[in-house]
């Protein structure tokens, strides 16, 4: 495989191009899908593409089911009465409907199947509360949407998603996907608020003879009040190209949108900055490339991968050699690459890690979260590249705390170097990863992820 020239490595290690773009993206603030801020972010990426000397830079617009946040509150009555109406305590989850509900609270812990089953009939007519945590003993990550749908299907009239990371940070995140809006009001609460609610529910259960978590006549009553809008709107992808004008292209992608409560620094302003920086570095060796590289920062990833689906559905499969998707790639300088079981997608990253003496973690499972899934489901070789973190779950992601100060420009430069070297390998020779049939991808998805996709109305296969 072809090695990235030393002068490009030196450029990557001393550049402030990507960090400057990342800073500008975070300073925009709200980049929620379909918002003015998301479009401003995409336009700023296009400016960076043009400054990097990339060609055909521009915006590609498409329709989405938009969501706009209003005010939300959560009140507790019973032995302890509290009202939570501040943004650091409670926020609505995108895809929720507007509505007001008052009902007993049932805490289902981490929201595993076993915990929902243990709650039993107590969930009928109740407000269900589940943690953002997935137990370490669980064989896969449990998406918040699964917990939300499990609550609604068992008769709950409201849903509370409590953070497991401290810091007065209520978590946000889509709960409806393509089935919008969802059936019951849903809010995220901070760990501190959630712990109080859990304690009250457990105390009531113990006082009623220990009948199980959240059972008993004296369970605290919770009132949810959610105001929001679910209306169609438009979103945009920012696109550009570098390299020879070949029909087939290597895709380097990320998403530019972020949840409205967050600056979206690591999720995923860093990914968008890396796409532009890698594009700039590749432009300095454009004559070496044998295959066109298409750079895309998708819109509307956070509410259902709409930008990625738009790109995948409007591009012939045979025109896409492979996809390298970047998401959450600046929490450290240690790469983590999910290959989705595509033979040949792992080796270039392993070769780069060896060449730079860099840590690398790889995985072969086929998980649906992330823009790469829109391509993987069609059998197109695609990887998700991120960085490892000591924090549990999303860490600061999807909260007010996903800010620039959590990141380090040295990490961004290191990841840019490694990703540029990997994409350079893909674009300077035959791509070793072969396309697969949709049927083989379908059969390779773990049963748990099959359930997640079907729950969210995103199962792309018959049956």
Image (cartoon, rainbow, N blue to C red):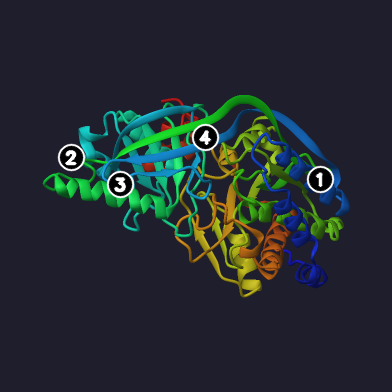
Q: Nearer the viewer, residue 321 or 177?
A: 177
- N-terminal label among 3 and 4: 3
Circle 4 — which element? helix
Q: CA distance from mark 2 to mark 3?
A: 16 Å
Query: Residue 302: percent from the left, percent from the top?
Result: 58, 41
Q: CA distance from mark 1 to mark 4?
A: 33 Å
- N-terminal label among 3 and 1: 1
Q: Is residue 233 left or right of residue 58?
A: left
Circle 3 — which element? loop
The residue indicated by pointer 3 is 80
Q: CA distance from mark 4 to mark 2?
A: 49 Å
Residue in the image at 29% along x and 44% along y: 108
The residue indicated by pointer 4 is 438
Q: Is residue 457 left or right of residue 11?
A: left
Q: Is residue 401 left or right of residue 31?
A: left
Residue in the image at 58% along x and 51% along y: 383
- Reply above or below: 415 against 45: below
């Amino acid at each position: 495989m072809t090695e990235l020239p030393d002068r490009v490595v030196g450029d990557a290690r001393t550049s402030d191009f990507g960090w400057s773009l990342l800073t500008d993206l975070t300073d925009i603030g709200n980049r929620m899908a379909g918002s003015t801020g998301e479009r401003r972010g995409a336009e700023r990426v296009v400016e960076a593409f043009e400054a990097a000397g990339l060609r055909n830079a521009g915006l590609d617009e498409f329709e989405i089911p938009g969501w706009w946040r209003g005010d939300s509150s959560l009140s507790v009555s019973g032995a302890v009465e509290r009202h939570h109406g501040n943004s650091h305590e409670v926020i609505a989850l995108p895809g929720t409907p507007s509505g007001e509900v008052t009902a007993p609270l049932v805490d289902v812990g981490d929201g595993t199947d076993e915990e929902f089953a243990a709650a039993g009939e107590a969930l009928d007519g109740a407000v269900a509360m589940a943690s953002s945590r997935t137990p370490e003993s669980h064989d896969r990550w449990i998406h918040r949407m699964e917990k939300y749908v499990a609550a609604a299907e068992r008769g709950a009239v409201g849903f509370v998603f409590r953070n497991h990371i401290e810091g007065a940070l209520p978590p946000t995140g889509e709960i409806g996907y393509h089935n919008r809006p969802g059936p019951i009001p849903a809010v995220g609460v901070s760990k501190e608020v959630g712990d109080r609610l859990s304690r009250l529910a457990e105390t009531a259960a113990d006082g009623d003879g220990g009948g199980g978590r959240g059972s008993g006549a004296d369970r605290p009553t919770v009132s949810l009040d959610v105001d929001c809008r679910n209306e169609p709107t438009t979103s945009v992808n920012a696109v550009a190209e570098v390299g020879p004008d070949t029909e087939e292209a290597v895709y380097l992608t990320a998403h530019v949108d972020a949840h409205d409560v967050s600056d979206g620094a690591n999720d995923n302003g860093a990914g968008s900055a890396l796409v532009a920086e890698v594009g700039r570095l590749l432009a300095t060796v454009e004559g070496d490339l044998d295959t066109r590289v298409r750079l895309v920062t998708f819109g509307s990833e956070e509410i259902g991968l709409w930008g990625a689906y738009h790109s995948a559905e409007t591009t012939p499969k045979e025109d896409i050699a492979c996809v390298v998707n970047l998401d959450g790639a600046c929490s450290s300088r240690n790469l983590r690459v999910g290959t989705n079981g595509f033979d040949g997608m792992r080796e270039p990253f392993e070769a780069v890690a060896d060449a730079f003496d860099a840590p690398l973690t790889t995985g072969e499972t086929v998980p649906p979260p992330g823009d790469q899934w829109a391509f993987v489901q069609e059998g197109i070789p695609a990887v998700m590249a991120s960085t490892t973190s000591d924090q549990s779950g999303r860490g600061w992601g999807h909260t007010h705390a996903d800010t620039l100060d959590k990141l380090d420009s040295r990490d961004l430069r290191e990841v840019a170097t490694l990703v540029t070297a990997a994409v350079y390998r893909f674009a300077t020779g035959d791509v070793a990863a072969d396309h697969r049939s949709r049927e083989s991808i379908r059969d390779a998805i773990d049963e748990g992820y099959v359930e997640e996709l079907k729950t969210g109305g995103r199962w792309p296969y018959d049956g």
